[in-house]
Image (cartoon, rainbow, N blue to C red):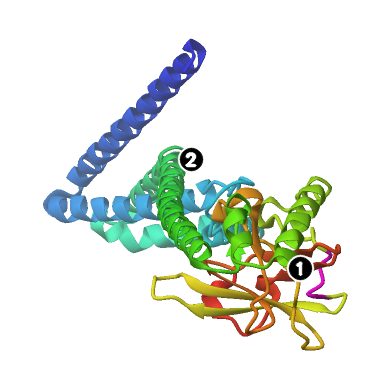
Amino acid sequence: MSNGANKIKTESETIKNYLWGSVIIAIILGVIMIGLISSYAANHYISAFGCGILIAGASISSGGVLGFIFGIPSVSQTPNARLKYNDNLVQISDWLTKIIVGVGLTQLYNIPRFVIKIGGQFQINFGGGTWAVNVAIAIMSYFFVLGFLMIYFWTKTDYSTIMKNMDIDLNRQLEDETKAKEHAQQERKDMATEIIQKETKTRISESDIASDKNTMAELQQNVNDSLSGELDKLKTIVSQKLSSKPVTIPDDLQKGRWGGKSENNGKKINAKVTKNSWQNLFDLVITIYNIDNTPLIIPVAIFVHDSYNLPDNVVYVAPDKNKGVAELSILAYEAFTIGALFADGTELELDLNEQQGFPTDFYW
């Protein structure tokens, strides 16, 4: 904080302390005034003093309520605030202020008569007569104005500060809770990512028809020479295609890169999702086949999410001789877009988040 800001704050605190000191002195003087006035009530001193204190208390309370209504600060909602203010009290204050001012102006000529009437109700406590009426009116007026100014000043200073600090504390608490929730979610996501990477790589390595870019030689050993040649060709095509297909959606990098169609050139991609024994994880089986149900005889490159941490995010899958389809089983924690590419240039794309029939918590 700068020296200028410190000076302003110090001056503000000095003025505030001075005003509160003046209020306390004014209250003390008012009580002394009631005591002096009550001494003229002869044998009714205690009754007169007690009545004067009650009148003063009621007046200062009434004036305080009015001061609070007039002093309530308007709500200023910042654009980035996490809390939405409930401004009902501000609206009520605004309505009452207008009503009180409006009625007061229209009934201005009746106010003196009303005040004198109330003073007449208390004159007996101060010995009776015109003097007693004036005493009651003086006490009411003095403490009413004092109560109004005191609470109006408090509302404009301490009340505003209290509300501001409460707003800051609540926003800080919400931010802390949000950060803690995001941290916990990130930890769960990191743990899930670690599990799916490990399990998916295990499934690929144990499969006779699937491999990543680095283990292509092992897959080629398990297939005939024709398929081995097709895999080499497919690997070259994938390398060429990837360089010409920029990622447009970083969170779902295959989205929009492979034509956007799940059916193309007589081939189709499908997926099955079921709950896994690991909490919040799912078994995902990706199947690619010929629409006319003839056996698939060429390999396919299947593109997955980058959270699997596979080279080029691609898995090469040869057709299963028994099923006549290309099938890949992996683990997932939420929906994503799958891409597929054949050596002849046929592209397929399947957004799992737009498919129906999967477990509800698989979608995002």
Query: Tag 2's secondary structure?
Result: helix
Q: Which residue appears farthest toward the front when viewing the image? A: 225
Tell me which residue sits at (41%, 53%) in the image. Answer: 187
Circle 2 residue? 156
Q: Amino acid at mark 1?
A: Glu
Indicate whether residue 260 is drawn in magenta. yes
The answer to which quarter of the image holds residue 159 is top left
In front: label 1 or label 2:
1
Q: Is residue 79 above or below residue 258?
A: above
The answer to which quarter of the image holds residue 35 is top left
- The reply, left or right, for residue 291 in relation to residue 352 is right
Q: Nearer the viewer, residue 309 or 221?
A: 221
List x then y, in percent, for residue 160: 46, 42
Q: Is residue 288 above or below residue 253?
A: below
Magenta-colored span: 259-263
List x then y, in percent, for residue 62: 40, 55
Q: Is residue 137 above or below residue 103?
A: above
Circle 1 residue? 349
Tell me which residue sits at (49%, 57%) in the image. Answer: 197
